[in-house]
Amino acid sequence: MAIFLRAKNCLLCTLKSLTNSQRFSHTLTEQARLSRGMGYSDSRAQQSSTIDMSGWKKINAKRVGVTHSMIPAHLWIVLKILQGKGFQAYLVGGCVRDLLLNRIPKDFDVVTTAKLKEVKKQFFRSVIVGRRFPICRVHIRSSVVEVSSFETVAKHAEEKEKVLLSQMPSGSDKKDFVCWRNSMHRDFTINSLFFDPFKNQICDYVNGLADLKSLKLRTIFPAHLSFQEDCARILRGLRIAGRLGLSISEDTEIAMRKLSSSVKSLDKSKIMMELNYMLSYGAAESTICLLQRFNLLELFLPFHAAYLNQQVGETYRSSSMLMKLFFNLDTLVSCNQPCDCSLWVGLLAFHLALVTNPQDAFVVWVFASVLYHGKWKEGVKFARENAKLQVKFVPEISGFSEFKTDKELAKEASHLAALVRDSVGTLIDTDILVRSMSKYPVSPSSGLVFVPKKTGNHVAQLFDVLLNDVESYESGRENFMIDYFQLGKGNQHETRFVLGKVILETLSSGLIKVGMEVGREVPEVIDEKHDPIPSDLEKYQTEMRKDKKRKNEVDLEDKSQEVPKKRQKAGETSQLPEGELNKMQENLLEKKKHQLQCQAKNDKRSGTVQKKSHDMARKHMKVINKVKHHQLHDDESKQLNVSGSSNLSNAEKMKWEEKKDCHVLLQELVKEKTEKLSKILVERKHGQPSLSSLFRR
């Protein structure tokens, strides 16, 4: 019996090997027909087929803008240690692609001729991980470098290797052949570029440079064969296209549409990893659009896909609240400063809660502001001072009612937090997802949930601080700059802060004038009643911190409110008590005379000085004559206009002009002091950003 089973297994292995070999040979033949210069060509007999090396390219990295300074120091250490032990080491894949595009790579992949066990021996802090495609993770200088081996790929596709080895040209360089052989096992042409940092060369064996120049996404082998071999390449391709803004070749797009449903066979952890790469690295909005275009969003996020389908027209979809949330998330994170998955899962749960149970816009402002500030009182204060204009998203926002007490706001904000917390269940439980889809009975639902329950519980805890006794919430922040290290680790305090920031910016982008179409972007509305104020939340928080430090100026606002009113009243009547006015006039005249005397002493030509002074006085008197008549006493003004200067003696006329001159100077002094005090009042009263310019870009 044992002999029979052994023979059966041997037969199955032989058939499997034969099938793989025939399939790979067919791949080579078909690809040769579809693409010229991709590294191989068709021949009459596959056994005698040869590699077309005419398409291989090597270019100087400096010519295309890639320099040694782009390589981090910790990566150089790994490369030099491997080279010092006699191994070849290259940068390969997406990092080379991003360097050529002058982008910061998400990570750096190293491939070497050394075996993984040999790599592990060279580094004290290193570990080999993975089963299907093992790699060695090298920890150095608080960073991680992933090192793979040429041998790993060769062992994984042993039958393919036999076909490739039979095609090795007799005069080819063995190093080039090893790199070409490795590139043939990769997914897309733009991901198959090698960078030799020691020779400073970019090596291209599959026309990747040409596709990168034209921003085209293309598979190395025929697309349907490539995706059948690994359907995860569909998600990877959409992620790359969304992040880099690539167009997709026709055959690749057709194959993606036909085989999109095959991604359901992927392990949930693999789906979660790919979705996290899509949404956490600064390309969430564009990637969601691609997922919807290829009917994959309804597979992974059926509720949100149905919501977007209900937003009729591309304009409405792009300006919908969901897309605005992820647009604003993209402005805060990037490949070198990513967020943890808990942030985008929290945004999905928040949006799902609003669609299911629309909320008052002012309550949402308070909810987001408290998350951002980490304090209930400051959050409510900010919302009251800045949520002045109408926000309109349909169906998420039910209206706007600013006149709510703090107790009412606390109750409704806690209710919203409970709704968001419960909405997390839709993303982690199939039964809850099915019940939620009753809102969209016509829309399809796969029933697939891929967010782990552990992640869901972590996200739900983000909103616990707003559930009970929210008015005593006093977590607070020392500064309002994003700590990307903590954000990437999923720190709840930091995630709440960024979550609130994203929602606040989204609410500001939903500002519309009454009567305008819902969901459409409109020009920025500026409230003319408000003075110019800071343009972002950070400036607001800076002013708040300065206010707390100024303990001796607590009553400045009340005083500055009284002084401008008095000054304004004095300016309108242009009158002061007679005794005070005469005293100020005398002081000003004495001061002016003193200045003239000082100038005369310093200038030997006293006659010239007197003449200049006389000319200046005449010019000043001309200006005085143009002053508005309401600055003079009514009876004196009337007497001067009717009787003329002939009715006054020269002494009286000079006295009148001096009095008038002093009065004008007094008015200027009052005006200057009023402006200064008004400016202080504005800074104290409107130190917080108003809604119109809070998030001006």
Image (cartoon, rainbow, N blue to C red):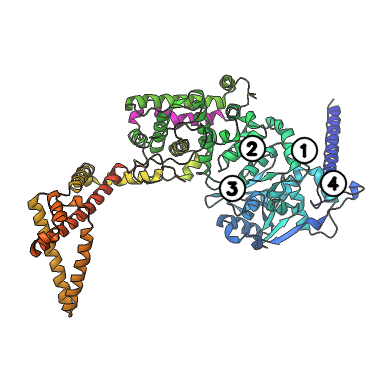
The residue carrying pointer 2 sits among few (fewer than 14), some (14 to 19) or many (20 or more) residues within 10 Å by Cα, namely some
**Residue segment shown in magenta:** 450-472
Q: Quadrant of residue 538?
A: top left
Sequence-wise, the earlier of marks 2 and 1 is 1
Check disc 3 and report the residue beneath it.
106
Nearest to N terminus: mark 4 or mark 1: 4
In the image, what residue occupies the spot 38% across and 40% down?
527
Closer to us: mark 2 or mark 1?
2
Label 4: how many Cα within 10 Å (few below 14, some 14–19, many 20+):
few
**C-alpha separation, residue under disc 2 versus residue under disc 1:** 19 Å
| Quadrant (top left, top right, bottom left, bottom right) of the N terminus | top right
Using the numbered discs, state the Cα–Cα distance from disc 3 to disc 2 in whole angstroms. Answer: 20 Å
**Secondary element at tag 4:** helix
| Apparent side of residue 512 relative to residue 656 in the rendered image (left or right) | right
The residue where tag 1 is placed is: 224
What residue is shown with label 2? Answer: 290
Instruction: Tell me whether the residue at label 3 lies in contact with that at label 1, contact meaning CB atoms closer than 8 angstroms.
Output: no
Query: Would residue 288 appear left or right of 339 to someone viewing this image?
Result: right
Image quadrant where residue 320 sits: top right
Identity of the residue drawn at 41% across and 44% down: 536
Q: Nearer the viewer, mark 3 or mark 2?
A: 2
Could you tell me which secondary element the residue under label 1 belongs to? helix
